[in-house]
Amino acid sequence: MRHGITPKGTHAHSFVSAFTSFSDLPSRLIDGVDVVERALEVRRRLGFSSASDSELAAFVAYAQAFPDGFLALVDTYDTVNSGIPNFMAVATVLSELGHKPVGIRLDSGDLAYLSKRARSMFVAADARLGGSSALASSAIMASNNINEAVLHSLNDQGHQLDALGVGTHLVTCQMQPALGMVFKLVEIEGKARIKISQDVSKVTIPGAKDAFRLVGKHDIPILDLLVPTSESAPVPGRRVLCHHPFEEKKRVFVTPSKVIPLLVPVWIGARHEAFARAKAEAVAGDSDSDAKDAATATAGAAADAAAAGAATVAPAASGAAAEGAAAPRREGAALGHRVRFPTPTEVRSYVRAQLSILREDHVRPLNPTPYKVSVTAGLYHFIHELWSREVPIAELA
């Protein structure tokens, strides 16, 4: 649990199909009890005597390895007539032995229907067994090419799913498989630079900038504001003029109730600056040339160490302090720069909190309203001044 997340999972279809009979089991026991015999008896009591024995053998083997993490893949042969009954049989025995089986995974078929059918079978079996099996509360998980469209369909149909396994479409977004962005130069040696394009969406916004989220009443974000580092940050309760970067008539006054900074440096200073400081301290008052050479080498090492210690927190945590979530914690007081990255749990909590306060029209699946990013009045005028200065005026004859 390196990142504070307990890894959990299930088995593959090939694991089930690898078993041909109960004779494939090295042992039939869990906690000294013949699980095969007990499971067969439970299965008969529930009226599913025709379910696959080889699948039951596979489930017993998996339960032996993970008695408190038993999550069975139930669609290798027949979900309703074999997989679910075999799970219920083994899970009931595990519960009787004091273990806590998890549930089932559905990986094919009509997931909404099968989840509801599985839940009704769990409830009926639990009642038939006297309520001692805890089957009714078993988790039902689904996989099989889960994407955004499937999620909306499941919600529209209604389902009994407790968890979803997103695999294929998790790493590569189906709707936007390529990340359409590039890094562009906006400032060099303190001088703002701009890139002009016939496509206004590709015109860069020059200069070093900070970004702030302006939150209105009811804790709903209004827009994000880009502010040159030379300007003061927006202040809660104080009105600020927000411009569209390129369209003159699109502007609005915003009086935020809360201001969330969005950018936190991940590197402060540079090696040559740290080197200069370290060298100056090392050779101050020392006229010996050999000592100066040694001090220079020492300063280089110190600069490397100082620069290496200057890494700070990722941008996602910056607003967390304002929201009471993943606030960065400082480490290494001697350097005064280093902070610990938030844990995955903290990042997840922060992201959930931020998504929950967005307006519904920003996150709706069909024709969502674009979230606004504006610039200050000063930055707006500077953009167009630099644009006019850098682009030559055409001559016509």
Image (spheres, rainbow, N blue to C red):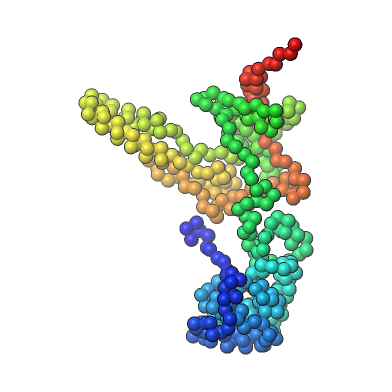
Q: Relative to residue 132, is residue 344 depicted above or below?
A: above
The image position of residue 134, as x and y in percent, is 63, 77
The image position of residue 235, as x and y in percent, is 61, 34
- Identified at 70% across, 40% down, the residue is 371
Snapshot quadrant of residue 222: top right
Given the current orientation, which residue lies at the most extreme top position?
Answer: 397
The image position of residue 191, as x and y in percent, is 54, 23
Q: Relative to residue 179, is residue 244 depicted above or below?
A: above
- Identified at 53% across, 39% down, the residue is 264
Given the current orientation, which residue lies at the most extreme front position?
Answer: 397
Whether residue 66 appears in this view of the structure is yes
Whether residue 93 appears in this view of the structure is no
The image position of residue 347, as x and y in percent, is 56, 51
Q: Which of 28 and 31 lies nearest the eye of the viewer?
A: 28
Give the left or right position of residue 368, taking residue 340 as reference.
right
- Identified at 30% across, 31% down, the residue is 296
Quadrant for the C terminus in the image? top right
Q: Which of 123 and 115 lies nearest the eye of the viewer?
A: 115
Image mark count: 0
Give the left or right position of residue 337, taking residue 228 as reference.
left
Give the left or right position of residue 367, taking residue 256 as reference.
right
